Image (cartoon, grey):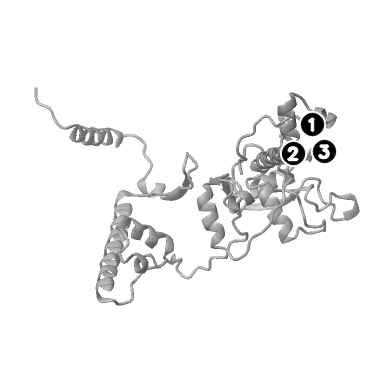
Amino acid sequence: MSSIPAERFYDELRLLRSWYDADGARTRPEETRDVALECSPVDDGTACLRITGPIPEIHALAQRLDAAARAIQAQQRHALEDGTPIPFDLDGDVARELSAMTLAELRYAVITRSVLDTGGVHVPAPAHRINVVVPVLTLMGLSDAPATYDGVVPLPADMARKLAAQESVWFRVLTDPTRGEFLPLPADQYRPTVAMVEHLRLRDPVCAVPTCTRRTSSDAENDHIEEFDHAHPARGGPTSIRNLHRLHWGHHDDKTRRLIDPERNDDGSTSWTIGTPVRARITTAPRRDLLTPFISTALADSWDRYQWFLELDALDRSGFIDQFLREGGPEDPALDDAPPPPEDLGDPPF
């Protein structure tokens, strides 16, 4: 019996399937044009920008990108040989390492570091900065607890420290050590200040409506949970951190039309009434920094162990331990009331 290689069989099977599928309803390739951001499923600090479109267009883009990378690489090699200025050495790595960038590095640099042409259309600057929240012990190199990018995506500790080192200004964010709640610093007033909006984005990196996953760094609005009364401001809900949250603009419209109705509870949770007439009621817990309570507990345990070792050292210096070992019991009644040792006397975690 004759056979063909598995790769050829797979190619011919794909061709056969495409032939049969051609008779059915299919989406035109031109209608699939899209660019989508996809984060890594393992939270390793990487992401993917997926470009979808007709095969000829995507292949042509790949060829242009490859041709640009090869041309730049050749010029970099010539510059290293001749001692002339090195082209496209964006970070100075070529000059330091005396080696041209790889094609993979150049393709990435060309597509991420080049100026995008918008045909003269003005592109407004981002309305908000992107927050990278780094635990202070991670920043100091005393812990490898992960940071978060834009309030959602975990970042490895090494990457977070590198990003922090590149910035000239850091913003301090305080959290409750037991609950991890972001503590508001700005004062209440009619219109939210920039600092208040930044605080809301820390607490609501995605739309506050249950199950919504849209980011609030764009296409989102500040919303008064208890509506502000423009005719009688004293009667309406205050413009305060407690009475504000961030909603995607579409859900903000739904709230204005009374299709969804939130109510902030005393414990910081929010109860949502959904639908008119009411179809469901859902209560959501406030978003918190998950690492703060863990780090606070670890620091408290480390402090307890430190205090215990200090007490042992003081007893040793006073001679009480030697006396205890010689006589088989404590001479000082105060030793009977000495605190028990911590459960774990191992090395402190930080």
Q: Under tag 3, what secondary structure?
A: loop
**x 65%, y 31%: residue:** 344
Label disc, if present, on residue 338 of the rendered structure: 1
Which is more toward the observer, 113 or 293? 293
Dot 2 corresponds to which residue?
A: 311
Percent position (x, y) of residue 116?
44, 65
Relative to 59, 299 lies left or right: right
Label 2 close to label 1 by CB (< 8 Å):
yes
Label 3: few (<14), some (14–19) or many (≥20) C-alpha neighbours in 10 Å = few
Mark identifier at residue 13:
none
Disc 3 and disc 2: Cα gap in Å?
43 Å
Specify whether residue 259 is in view.
no
Q: Amino acid type of disc 3?
A: Asp
Which residue is disc 3 drawn over?
A: 266
What's the amino acid at mark 1? Answer: Ala
User: What residue occupies the far left of the structure in this picture?
Assistant: 1
Residue that sits furthest to the front in the current view: 326
Question: Residue placed at 30% from the left, 64% from the top?
Answer: 99
* Distance (Cα) linking label 2 and label 1: 9 Å
